[in-house]
Image: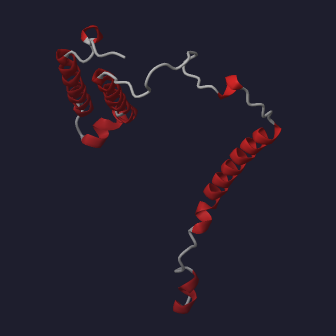
């Protein structure tokens, strides 16, 4: 039988630093290896700057005009729509992983099905809105580069 004074070693808080030691070692190795590779490349590589190597390279063509040209707003709208629909597609993965367990978790057989039907409905409403606005119709855009 243990006395009350003997339980002190069980009540001590563990040092949580040791739990993070493998992570810190992995970060240190990654930073060290990346630094070594960059330094070795700089030391071993040839340094012969020529006029061609120092010239501006832009898609294989000589740059012409002002770099601050205007872009069509449609370009940014399509980029934002891509991000929006991409993120929405990513949100379907967790649902797909637990779909078979949803009846046990919610108590309803069709909860998961109706949940994704509503979710895809929201996506379709957004899609029909952007089609109706003509954001994806590039033939009407006269403000290209």
Residue displayed at 35% across by 34% down: 91
The answer to whether any part of residue 1 appears in the image is no
Display colour scheme = secondary structure
**Image spot of residue 94 (x, y percent):** 38, 36
Quadrant including the N terminus: bottom right
Residue 129 percent across, percent down from the top left: 18, 21
Task: Residue at 55% x, 79% y: name it.
Answer: 10
User: Residue at 55% of width from left, 86% of height from top?
Assistant: 8
Judged left or right of residue 64, residue 109 is left
| Number of residue marks | 0
In the image, 49 versus 8, the foreground residue is 49
The one of 44 and 67 positioned closer to us in this rendering? 67
Q: Quadrant of the C terminus?
A: top left
- Asked if residue 133 shows in the view, the reply is yes
Q: Position of residue 62 (x, y in %)?
A: 56, 17
Residue 24: percent from left, percent from top: 63, 58
State the residue in front, 54 or 109.
54
Q: Is residue 55 depicted above or below 43 in this figure?
A: above
* Farthest residue, direction right: 44
Classify residue 93 by image quadrant.
top left
As rendered, which of 70 and 121 lies closer to the eye? 70
Tell me if residue 141 comes above or below residue 6 in the rendering. Answer: above
Residue positioned 43% across, 25% down in the render: 66
């Amino acid at each position: 039988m243990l006395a009350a004074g003997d339980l002190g070693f069980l009540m001590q808080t563990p040092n949580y630093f040791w739990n993070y030691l493998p992570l810190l070692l992995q970060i240190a190795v990654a930073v060290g290896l990346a630094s070594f590779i960059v330094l070795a490349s700089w030391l071993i590589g040839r340094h012969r700057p020529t006029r061609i190597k120092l010239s501006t390279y832009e898609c294989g063509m000589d740059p012409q005009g002002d770099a601050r040209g205007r872009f069509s707003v449609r370009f940014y709208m399509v980029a934002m729509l891509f991000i929006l629909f991409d993120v929405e597609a990513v949100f379907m993965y967790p649902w797909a992983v637990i779909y078979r367990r949803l009846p046990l978790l919610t108590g309803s057989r069709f909860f998961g099905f109706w949940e994704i039907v509503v979710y895809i409905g929201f996506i379709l409403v957004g899609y029909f809105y952007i089609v109706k606005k003509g954001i994806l119709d590039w033939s009407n855009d006269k403000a290209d580069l």
